[in-house]
Image (tube, rainbow, N blue to C red):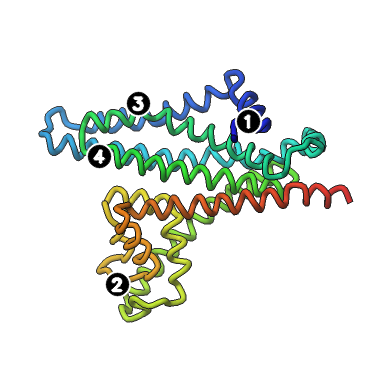
Amino acid sequence: MILSNPITVKELRVRMRGIRAIIPIMAYIVVLGIFVLVQFKNYGSTMNYQELQNRGRDLGFLLLYIQIFLVLVLSPAYAASAITTEKERETFDIMQATLLSGRDIISGKVFSGFSYAALLVISSLPLLALSFWMGGFDFSHLFWGFMIVATCALIITCTGIFVSTVVSRSYMATGITYGVIFAGFGISMILNLILQNIHMRNATIGLGTFSWDTVPMWLGFTLNPLFMMQALDKGDIDFYTGVGGYYVNPLIDFFDTLAISFNLPYIAVHVIFSIIIAMLLIQFSSYFLFKSSREDNK
């Protein structure tokens, strides 16, 4: 059991001790609350039932988008210093001398970092309850929306800890992690726009065939939580084809058809592949954890 991992227990006790754990949660809720108040201020005093439902749906997805942004900003700072802090405090050798394997140490660090991010997301439930009250935002939106935010936090946490195992300083690990995360988001979105524009100008390029851009486009689309949140909002993934629907990606269409056959949205594909990538990052982190330490001691 992960809760029996001494690294997890120690990290959670240290992280949740004192006011340092409460301030980020309070700031997180305050930021979300400000956006809710601004939205309510823009609402008219008289709305029919349909308008109220539309407002509720817009409010729910606005909060989910903001949570993705906040997770992007907050999670790397906690994860990227997970191992480097141990090295800087000179406690890494003590941890290395225990009976814990590299995978146990990394798993404990990942779970403690991810659990704090999950706590931030769960703390937003009272605000999201307003969307249920207004209508237009149901349980399926909440469930899959939280899954998108949670997998985003998991990938960021695993990425930060992986960088922390190969870099010796916290400030370097934090900077690299932020760079990798934001570069990944930016490249996937820019690549999507470029490919849509190329195929819009020449509709015969790779139409329905396995062209050179099939795999990178599929990865960029499937692993980007902003695209997945847009798919959840629209109810389908047809928007990825661009204006006029000229771009067709066989991999995206294949996995979409596969998900539909199980009565699941495409977001399920995103969740599954995100978990697979997180497991690979944990495995790589476990390998480099003691390898980098041995190289430093030479």
Residue extending furthest toward the bottom? 204
Mark 1 vs mark 4, foreground winner is 1
The residue under the point 23% across, 29% down is 133
Label 4 residue SS = helix
- Circle 3 — which element? helix
Q: Tell me which label, 1 or 4, sits earlier in the chain.
A: 1
- Image mark for residue 57: 4
Residue at x 69%, y 48% (from the top left corner): 286
Residue 71 falls left or right of residue 232: right
Residue pushed farthest front? 1
| Residues at marks 3 and 1, CA–CA distance in whole angstroms | 31 Å
Disc sitting over residue 246 in the figure:
2
In the image, residue 104 lies at what x, y percent?
Answer: 67, 40
Direction from residue 238 to residue 291 in the image, left or right = right
Residue 227: image quadrant is bottom left
- Position of the N terminus, as image quadrant, is top right
Distance Cα–Cα, label 1 vs label 4: 40 Å
Q: Nearer the viewer, mark 3 or mark 1?
A: 1
SS assignment at label 1:
helix
Disc number for residue 4: 1
Question: Nearest the camera: 167 or 109?
Answer: 109
Local packing at callout 2 (Cα closer than 10 Å; few below 14, some 14-19, many 20+) is: many
Total residue callouts: 4
For residue 207, above or below residue 4: below
At label 2, which amino acid type do we have? Answer: Tyr
> In this view of the protein, which residue sits in the foreground, 154 or 77?
154
Query: Amino acid under label 4?
Result: Arg
Local packing at callout 4 (Cα closer than 10 Å; few below 14, some 14-19, many 20+) is many
Q: Could you give the CA–CA distance between mark 1 and mark 2, rounded to whole angstroms?
A: 52 Å
Label 3 amino acid?
A: Pro
Q: Which mark is residue 126?
A: 3
Residue shown at 65% from the left, 33% from the top = 5
